[in-house]
Image (cartoon, grey):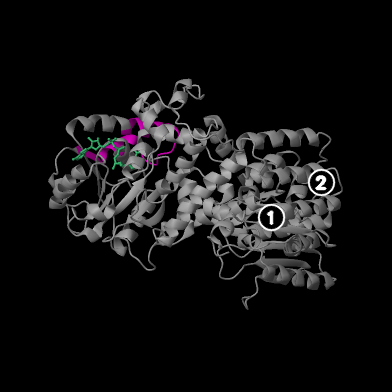
Amino acid sequence: MSSERAFNVKMEDGLGIITFDVIGSPMNTWSEDTVTEFLELLEDLKKDETLKGLIFISGKPNAFFAGADLKLFTLLKTREETAKAISYFRNAFYEISSLRVPTMAAIQGFCVGGGLELTLACTARIAKDSKTTMLGLPECNVGLFPGAGGSQRLPRLIGYPAVDLMLNCNFLNAEKSHQIGMVDRFVPADGDLLEEAKTFLKEIISGKAQLKRPEHDFSDIDNVAEQARQKVLKKTKGRELPGRMLCIKSFQDGLKLSLEEGLKLEGEYFIDSILSDEAKGSINTFFLKNLTDKPKNMMTRGFEPKPLKKAAVLGFGTMGRGIVIDILRNMQVPVIVKDIPEALEPGKAFLRKIFDGMAEKKRLKVPVDDLMNLLTVTSEYTDDFKDVDIVVEAVFEDIKVKEEVYGELCKVVREDCLISSNTSSLPITTMSQYVTHPERFGGTHFFSPVWLMQLVEVIRGEKTSQDTVDNLLNFAASIRKRPIVCRDNPGFVVNAMLFPFLLNALQYVEEGNSIEKVDGAMTRFGMPVGPIRLTDEVGIDVPHKIFVGMGVEQKTLKNVVEDGRLGLKKSGKGFFLKDGSVDPEVLPLIAKREAKERTDEEIQTGLLTALIGVGRDLLDRQIVDDPRMIDVGMIWGTGFPSDKGGPLKWADLIGLSEKLFGKKFYKD
Ligand code: NAI
């Protein structure tokens, strides 16, 4: 515990002004220490007979109060310890609401989760307009719900609009919060929040300010709750995830009771949500997101990235175009693209079309013409390449072509120009021999369509220097990608994970389980699409070629590809018809195995087992140093359900990793 106090109180004409500022933290959050200190302070204030009212205000201009430290929740295992842990801040809020004097929350900056719940326990709220003043209850996004009074007090304050606010996790600014009645008074940006709060509180004490809350009629609560439940289930495709489901149950049941009884019930449901695997999975995803939101966190400490003032992309095909789009829109630096003459104009036209679409949706910071003017297209290695800082190669997947390209490229670029390949299957170490100064060469494996997929795998070849890895991470950050770092490996991380996953899925189909059943089991697990549809979308020839290269014979894929079915998008025919149903003509192409009917659970566990088997192997061979890299790859590269926290985290949570390998992937 810091020796400096987080809460400081100043008395002024009988008003106690409590300023909170958790020293050394950018946010004020609840921890056992801060709550203990807070409760002690309230005990002292209660004894003060001259006290007429209390104001809570933050010492941080951009942060009022966030909720509890999420890490705390992940460590809770039993009902008893969870009940004890949440009772700290739930009691603190209860104490505020039962003080004999009126209380006022003076809000400026982020006021979210348990921070907003604190204000809801006060008699009144006043909020000052500012860019960072945002009020909201985002707990459902991490598998929890507003269980420190929020699910009871907010509906009682503002009525049914509270339902969407909690379930959609919307943030509202000060003005909007005032409009819906979540705060009582609005202070404009140039106003003095503390002075206004004092005036307001004095008016409440003197009875001048009437705080008559509208009486809300909750007789229709069962209908409202049912509609909310259906809306949530539509989004989750029928999966009953505990956080939001318990939130609905909490206000549905709680609003039929007195506030006190409702709060008690909320507490029980809150414990259920905290102890759910989905909350722990979602919180893991929240931390994975934070880690990779700022790739600087992943660079060597103190590393100064090389400025990237000009870029080049080789190949203006599917991937090259996407990479250019992301460089131009995020970095706004000159980009040279090299391809054969026939590829140049279609590539430019494609870029313009995508940019126009983005501009229409107001997703571009600069006019389309300004972006297009930064682009130079060429079919020669001109002098323009001399001052390029980074080259991304995305030419045909053919080692001979790559060799030729690197040979020519290295004659024109500077010796310290960073070079990366977008190859999906060729070893970075093999290609590094074609690059002079191979330490400046590594992999940047993007996913298609590049401008929509957040993930990029940064690959360290045997000769790639740490500086290059750090610079490639900086490049990823500059184009707003979410990177993971790995060593050279067939399929790197994400595709390597998917190979056995697909092999197992095809095996189940060959055993007589229908494609719909196998895909359905995985969408019910939470994947956006099943493994067979994923293959159809990527191109059936892609895994087929990879399996052939690995010496694995997958008969169904072979039959389907030899029948000219490369996937619905790629060749007009694949496993599925346009209406989404399985093409009956593909059924005779499915190879036969000994029949074995499998349940949803068997399919899900079988495919998860395939994934984590690869995960274990990637860690054992040190392709990645950290299990989190694999989970980031699977969540943002394949849409693995974020409420499960990634395949490795999920296997830890459900006990599968300990059962199979005798240990967990994560340390805690
Ligand atoms: P693509 O066939 O759409 O485009 C390749 C482009 O490279 C063509 O426009 C071609 O004219 C050009 N090209 C060929 N030789 C060249 C040379 N000597 N100099 C300049 N340009 C040349 O291929 P795609 O799909 O864009 O793939 C490119 C690279 O990205 C490959 O290494 C591939 O493995 C990788 N990749 C592909 C993904 C995908 O989903 N398509 C995903 C991730 C990586």
Q: Which residue is mark 1?
A: 274
> Closer to the observer: label 2 or label 1?
1
- In the shown orientation, is residue 330 left or right of residue 245? left
Residue found farthest to the front: 594
Q: Which residue is mark 2?
A: 254
Mark 1 lies on a secondary structure that is: helix
- In the shown orientation, is residue 112 left or right of residue 217? left
The span from disc 2 to disc 1 (Cα, nearest Å) is 18 Å
Magenta segment? 351-377
Image coords of residue 353 (percent x, y): 35, 30
Q: Nearer the viewer, residue 180 or 473?
A: 473
Mark 2 lies on a secondary structure that is: helix
Q: Is mark 2 within 8 Å of ligand 1?
A: no
Q: Dot 2 surroundings within 10 Å: few (below 14), some, or many (20 or more)? A: many
Image coords of residue 559 (percent x, y): 38, 29
Image coords of residue 301 (percent x, y): 39, 68
First-in-chain label (2 vs 1): 2
